[in-house]
Image: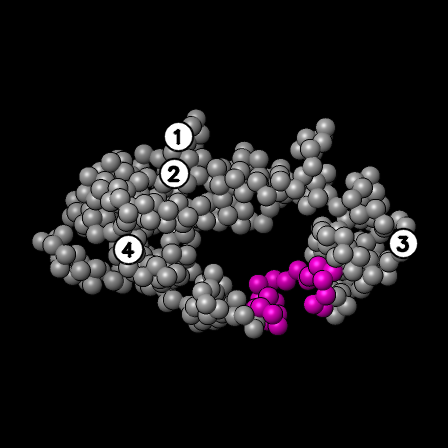
Amino acid sequence: MLEGLRVIEFEGLGPGPFAAMLLADLGAEVITIHRPGPGAPGLLDRGKRSITLDLKAPDDIAIARALIASAEALIEGLRPGVMERLGLGPKDCHALNSALVYARMTGWGQTGPLAPVAGHDLNYLARSGALWFAGLPGDAPMPPPALVGDIGGGAMYLAVGLLAGVMRARMTGQGTTVDAAIVDGSAHMLALLLSLRPPTAQGFARGTGPLDGPHWSRSYGTADGGHVAVQAYEPKFYALLLEGLGLAGDPAMAAQHDPEQWPAQTARLAAIFAAHPRAHWETLFGASDACVAPVLSPDEAAADPHMAERGTWQETGGTLQPSPAPRFDGHRADLNPLPARDQHRTEILTDLRQRGLLP
């Protein structure tokens, strides 16, 4: 789908490489500039081409500039100011390539009091407001590691911003600079959750919304130490949940949306789910609309009948990997290979010379 799009990625951590992998999965040509030194290819390098450059060496800076001049987009995830000190900031790069989409990935953003300060996924979520809802009342907030911040609020917004910039550049010839910040993206992701919360005098009190408090929207432990996830939001699905648990017609469970009753109803469901192993509940609810699912590890998910039929997980070289997503016309994409560091130096330099960008 993205064939013909050339993206230059400066080696970084987390969301930048993930966004570049996503673009490569979708067919973009991604050339990663790796730092000198040892290092095995990581999962996030799949589908990319690799060249190692020392960005403090004049000859290698010249190669980096030539690559930038040849591309439609650039991804970097260093602290604000680092690329400028290398002479590779947005102004420098737009002087080389006015149509370039310069996509920057940070936690705090390019501006603001915290822009130069260190941080990690959990810090950004804490300050953006996204971490507030990530846990039950009385528990310390803890979202799935990296999924909400680095990937959801970071990499996905970087990729969307980059592609939006490319669309405009192809129409107008004018490039742009994308400031993708995890604090911005993770806050933006709250829009759906906030749209489901009725206005109350409690404001944003934890455990009062339809997705962070009810007995029908949480995970429960099972007798064998496993867990099942329940989210029977609509009344018709809630009725099927109660029926499966033997609680149909129970007056104590009838009030689905009364927060005052949620604690007692939660305790009731917890005791029932804890009485049997996870496999029992898998068999009982199966493919019903009760909205009950087993909580699977990645290797268990790969063996799950639904996931296996779709090929959502693939194994190559003894390593389990998620398949590219989304899929187009119903077809699953195969996994791209992992490059060795500097594997494509010769062909990349040859291409740049053919383009007249290097002597």
| Tag 3 residue | 250
Image mark for residue 254: none
What residue lies at 41% left-to-right and 31% top-to-bottom? Answer: 115
Image coords of residue 169 (percent x, y): 28, 46
Amino acid bearing label 1 = Thr
| Tag 1 residue | 111
Mark pair 2, 1: CA separation: 9 Å
Please indicate whether residue 44 sits to the left or right of residue 296 in the image: left
| Tag 2 residue | 179
Front: mark 2 or 3: 3
Badge 2 element: strand
Q: How many marks?
A: 4
Residue at the top extreme, as displayed: 113
The answer to the question of whether label 2 and label 1 lie on touching residues, with beta carbons closer than 8 A, is yes
Amino acid bearing label 2 = Asp
Label 3 Cα neighbours within 10 Å, binned few <14 / some 14-19 / many ≥20:
few
Badge 1 element: loop
Mark pair 1, 3: CA separation: 56 Å
What residue lies at 41% left-to-right and 48% top-to-bottom? Answer: 160
Badge 3 element: loop
**Which badge, 4 or 2, is on the more N-terminal residue?**
4
Front: mark 4 or 1: 4
Mark pair 4, 3: CA separation: 61 Å
Image coords of residue 271 (percent x, y): 83, 55
Image mark for residue 6: 4
Amino acid bearing label 4 = Arg
Label 2 Cα neighbours within 10 Å, binned few <14 / some 14-19 / many ≥20:
many
**Residue 20 appears in the picture as rendered:** yes
Please indicate whether residue 12 sits to the left or right of residue 270 in the image: left
Span colored in magenta: 286-307
